[in-house]
Amino acid sequence: MRRHLLALTAASLALAGCGTTEPARTNAAAAKGTQHITLTDATGAKIKLDGPAEKVVATEWNVVESLVTLGVDPVGVADVKGYKAWDTSAPLKNTPKDIGTRGEPSMDTVASLSPDLIVATSDLPAAAVKQLRKIAPVLELSSADSSDQIGRMKENLDLIARATGTTAKATQANKEFDAKLAEGKKTLADAGLAGRSVAFADGWVASNQVSIRPYTGGSLIGAVNEAIGLKNAWKVKGDKSYGLGSTDVEGLSGLGDVDFAYIGNASEPSDPFAKDLAKNSAWTSLPFVKKDDVHRLPDGIWMFGGPKSMQAYVDALVAALTK
């Protein structure tokens, strides 16, 4: 399952082919006398650009979404097919080169694109980032922060905007996101749903067993839920980066009277909640299952995305709770 890459540790990710690389071409903006740009990324590294980056490669889907949101068409994207399936809130407007998987980019492919800038995240192994820095400047972002996911999302968008000369678009995108939160919160309050407990999760099947991943209050989804006036129902502890937990069907018994929401995808082999658990007594006996308060939200809303994905999430969740 593609989304499970996010749960892997950096040490477990292999590196792509380590062929020859070439230095990035001089940014065309430099020839026009554009002022140089100096940025500090999440690792503390100084990134120097001759001008706003135009040919940008992205190694993670949240970064791709940010670029598209800012009106920048990336020349290289990790797992293009997966992005198109899982993140439809910010659809690609061009046909970027597929550079490999999100955890294992092809160095040769990236080098062949002669990018002005490579935007990576802390999900990529340090050794891979080191290789990428031999090809072009790399802006490495902290992909998640359970202490302030919304703040991290906005800061990442702003940093990419500074690198690409699109700060006005970032400001607008963040304003639209804030307005959507306010709109969703008001709609829920008007419907008498302020403070309603919600449990969001995803799940998958392995060895005929359904594993469930709770999105705690430390997750981006959890933070958005709370921002629109809902209460996160999960009591399990999430990891320090993504705020994701782990449980099984029996672990849902303590949730009580909640609304249960999840996002699947047509590209997945099965829907564990609608199909694999359909005859599981531990599942069918849960209060929210009996009351039909289980909501599969529309495909294509990336749970780890940017403002566009989270706006789509707010719309989808509010519609499901108020129908």
Image: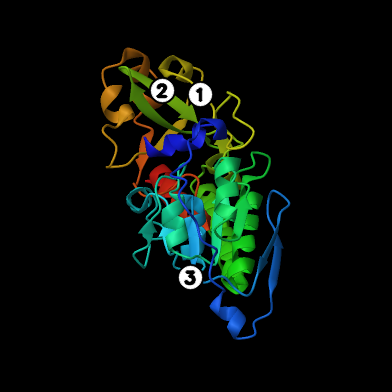
Give the mark nearest the N terminus, 2 or 1.
2
Label 2 crowd (10 A; few <14 / some 14-19 / many >=20): some
Q: Which SS class for mark 2?
A: strand
Q: Residue under circle 3?
A: 71
Furthest toward the front, the residue is: 20
Q: Nearer the viewer, residue 268 or 279?
A: 268
Label 1 crowd (10 A; few <14 / some 14-19 / many >=20): some
Q: Residue under circle 2?
A: 211
Kind of residue indicated by mark 2: Ser
Q: Nearer the viewer, residue 266 or 159?
A: 159
- Distance, label 2 to label 1, CA atoms, is 8 Å
| Label 1 close to label 3 by CB (< 8 Å) | no
| Label 2 close to label 1 by CB (< 8 Å) | yes
**Residue 195 lies in what quarter of the image?**
top right
The mark closer to the camera, 1 or 3, is 3
Q: Nearer the viewer, residue 37 or 213?
A: 37
On the rendered structure, is 73 left or right of 138? left
Q: Which of the image's four quarters has the N terminus? A: top left
On the rendered structure, is 163 left or right of 107? right
Q: Residue under circle 1?
A: 246
* Label placed on residue 99: none
